[in-house]
Amino acid sequence: MDSFLHKTDIAVQRILRIVVLFFFLALAFLLAYNVLLRLTNDLSTFLTERGFSEAAGAVRGWLPITSMHWFDEIVELCFAALIFYGAASLWASGGHFSVGDWISPRLPYERLRNLYRLLVDLLGLAFLWVFFFYSLRLTFRATELTTVFQIHKSALYCCMPVSSFIMLLYSLRDVWNDGKRLFSPGRGA
């Protein structure tokens, strides 16, 4: 069973990293394309104003100036997914930011340190449960469509309950491990 859970953990973390990398690259590509499009438009306008209409036409032929009215919708989708799946990836690997670790080294007893870590993990678990519940509710109740592509807003919001569920599972793992550490025999005061 431990081997299965370990392999599943590795697979989930790899999938999360791939998803995060995909959305990061999509955002980078969209940003670069948007900047290039604006620079091309500015260069074309500059050349036209200076009387170089043929050069401006060549610039327009090189990169057709198109409307990017859809840009905001895709960026919103990619950015939300990048943030939430990135948080889940960090949570799964234990690489997330933690401010509470300065207390545990100051606690005099091992059992007290384990109790402290368990309480911190239980608070994180409670937060993630609330986040999961309300993000799932938001996703199911969303009825609006995006302006350009007519995508259901729930498709944009689904990264929140999925990532919070993943973080919830990893928090349960942390609570279980800290509970075992706290209540295992041989952990004296």
Image: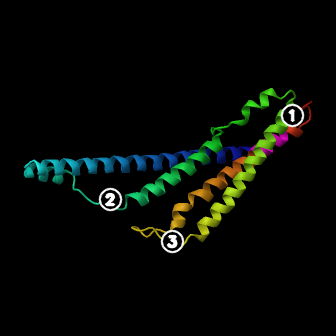
Magenta-colored segment: predominant secondary structure: helix
Residue 105 in the image, given as x and y percentages of width and height: 78, 27
Label 1, on which residue? Answer: 112
Q: Is residue 80 highlighted in magenta? A: no
Residue at figure coordinates x 64%, y 63% from the top left: 136
Q: CA distance from mark 2 to mark 1?
A: 57 Å
Label 3, on which residue? Answer: 144
For badge 1, the amino acid type reads: Leu
For badge 2, the amino acid type reads: Met
Residue 61 in the image, given as x and y percentages of width and height: 16, 54
Magenta range is 174-180
- Local packing at callout 1 (Cα closer than 10 Å; few below 14, some 14-19, many 20+) is some
Res. 160 visible in picture: yes
Q: Which mark is residue 68?
A: 2
Foreground pick, 163 / 103: 103
Determine the image quadrant of residue 174. top right
Q: Earlier in the sequence, mark 1 or mark 3?
A: 1
